[in-house]
Amino acid sequence: MNFESYLFIVLASGAVFTGIMMITRKNPVMSVIYLIINFFCVSGIYLLLKAQFIAIIQVLVYMGAIMVLFLFVIMLLNLKEEKKLSDNFGYKKITALLLCITLMSLLGLTFYFGFDKRYNEMSLKAEQIGVAEYLGKELFTTYSFPVIIAGLILLAAIIGAVVLAKKKFE
C-alpha cells in the first residue's frame, strides 16, 4: 500500500466518523462543526481522485455558503432543550431499521468487491475529467445549450423571488 491508500483510509474514516458524530449530537452547533469537518474529508477524497474542481467547489459552495446558512438558521431559531421522544417501536422505527440493515449490507458488498484486483489503475481520461479546464471546455462546447437553459431558469427564479419580495413589502 502506498501513501495515497493510507491517506484515503484516514480521510474515509474521518468522513464516516464525523458523519456519525454529526447525526448523534444533541447540540446543533456541534453537528454543524462535524459537518464542516466531514466536508473537508470528502474534499480530500476528491483530491485523491484527481478531481480538483469538484474538491474546490465542495469547499467553496458547501462550506462557504450552505454551512453559513445552516449556522444562521440555527442561531435564528434559538433552539431550546429538546423533549424526549417516546421509546415505543412503531412501524417507522422498524422500517428505518430494515432500511439501515439493507444499506449496510449493500455498502459491505461494495466494499468487498471494491478491493478486487481488476481496478488497479485509473485511465488518463478519468484523471482529465476532474480538471477545471476540461470541465469548462465540455460545459461550454458539448453542453452549451443545457448550461444556457439552466442559466435562464435560474434568472427566472431570481426575478420571481424579487417580484414576490417586492409585493410583500409594498
Image (spheres, grey):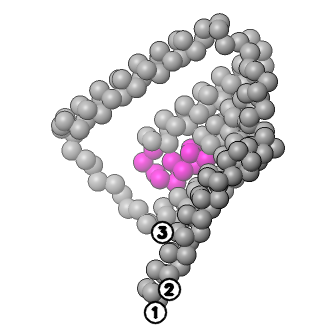
Q: Which mark is residue 27?
A: none
Q: CA distance from mark 2 to mark 3?
A: 23 Å
The image quarter containing residue 80 is bottom left
Q: Is residue 47 above or below residue 169?
A: above
Q: Nearer the viewer, residue 123 or 82?
A: 123
Q: Which mark is residue 76?
A: 3
Which one is earlier in the sequence, the residue at label 1 or at label 3? 3
The image quarter containing residue 35 is top right
Q: CA distance from mark 1 to mark 3?
A: 25 Å
Q: Which mark is residue 166?
A: 2
Residue 56 makes an appearance in the image: no
Q: Tell me the kind of residue under disc 3.
A: Leu
- Left or right of residue 100: residue 110: right
* Residue at (52% x, 69% y) in the render: 157
Q: Tell me the kind of residue under disc 2.
A: Lys
User: Magenta segment, which residues?
Assistant: 25-36
Q: Is residue 69 above or below residue 61?
A: below
Point out residue 57 in the picture as x, y percentages from the top left corner. 69, 48
Secondary structure character of the magenta stretch overall: helix
- In this figure, which residue is indicated by the disc labeled 1? 170
* Residue at (74% x, 11% y) in the render: 1
Of circles 2 and 3, the one toward us is: 2
* Residue at (55% x, 32% y) in the render: 17
Point out residue 45 in the picture as x, y percentages from the top left corner. 68, 32
Q: Is residue 6 above or below residue 54?
A: above
Secondary structure category for the residue under label 3: helix
Please say if the residues under marks 1 and 2 sit with CB atoms less than 8 Å apart.
yes
Q: Tell me the kind of residue under disc 1.
A: Glu
Q: Is residue 74 above or below residue 126?
A: below
